[in-house]
Image (cartoon, helix red, strand yellow):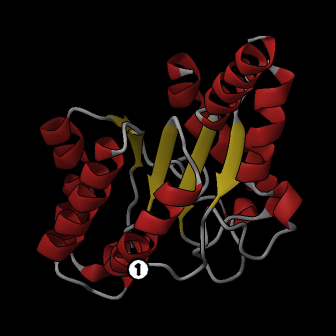
Amino acid sequence: MRALLLWFLILCSTSLYAQKNIIILGDSISAAYGVPTEQGWVSLLQTRLETNHKQYNVINASISGDTTNEGLKRLPSLLERHQASFILIELGGNDGLRGYSLNSIKTNLKALIKQSKEKNITPILLAMRIPPNYGKRYTSGFQKIYQDIAQENDITLVPFLMNDVALNPKLMQKDGIHPTELAQSILLDAVWDTLEPLL
C-alpha cells in the first residue's frame, strides 16, 4: 500500500512539474540571431524567472526565418513533447517581410492559438511590425492583425517588443532587422512586464 501511495505521489509531482513549462515559438528575434544564445532575451527570461523564484522552465522552440505556416507545422509535435502552462507566439515578421497575404497570416496565427488552447495552454501573442517601405496600407494592416486577434480570441498581447529598439542604431545589427546583444535585456523587459503578472 505504501509503495502504491509513493508511486502515486511521484506521478502527481511529475505531472505538476511538467505543467511548469513556457514554450517560446518564434523566429530569429527569439532565436538570438547574431548574438550569443545565452545572451538572447529568451535565455535571459529563464535567468529572471529563477532570480524571481518562479518555477518555470523555458523551452525555446524558435527558428530563424520561421513563418506562421512553418510554426503551425511544428506546433503539434511541440505540444505533444512539452506539456506547458504558457506558449509565447512571436511569429509573423517573416511573413510580412515576404509580403504574404494578411488573411493567411491572421488565419495561421489564429490556428496556433486555437491548437494551444485545445491543449489547455495559455497563448500569449507578441505583436510584430514591419518596415514602412512596404506601404502604409500593408504595414498598418499587418500591425492591426495582432490587435484584432488578441481581442477576438480574448488573449494577452505583448506590445511590439522592439518598440524601444528598432529605431536606435546602437541597438540594431547592421541589417537593420535584428537587435544587438545590448538590446536583449530591453526585449526581455517588454515581455516580462506582460508575462510576470500571469505567472
| Amino acid type, label 1 | Glu
- Using the rendered image of the protein, determine whether residue 158 is visible from the camera's viewpoint: no
Residue at point 58%, 58% (across, down): 81
| Within-10-Å neighbours for mark 1: few <14, some 14–19, many 20+ | few
Q: In this view, does 188 lie above or below 14?
A: below
Residue at point 71%, 74% (across, down): 33
Residue at point 18%, 39% (across, down): 153
- Using the rendered image of the protein, determine whether residue 188 is visible from the camera's viewpoint: yes
> Which residue is at the front of the view, 58 or 181?
58
Q: Quadrant of residue 92?
A: bottom left
For this view, does 138 lie left or right of residue 172? left
Residue 30 placed where, x, y %? 63, 61
Residue 80 placed where, x, y %? 49, 58
For this view, does 89 lie left or right of residue 13? left
Q: Quadrant of the N terminus?
A: top right
Q: What element carries label 1?
A: helix
> Which residue is at the front of the view, 198 or 16?
16
Q: Quadrant of the C terminus?
A: top right
Q: In this view, does 152 lie above or below 2?
A: below
> Which residue is at the front of the view, 178 or 48?
48
For this view, does 21 lie left or right of residue 3? left
Task: In the displayed orientation, state which residue is furthest to the front.
Answer: 1
Q: Quadrant of residue 103?
A: bottom left
For this view, does 153 lie left or right of residue 43? left
Q: In which quarter of the image is residue 115?
A: bottom left
Residue bearing mark 1: 70
Q: In this view, does 134 lie above or below 141?
A: below
Q: Is residue 118 above or below residue 38?
A: above
Residue 116 placed where, x, y %? 35, 48
Residue 82 placed where, x, y %? 58, 52
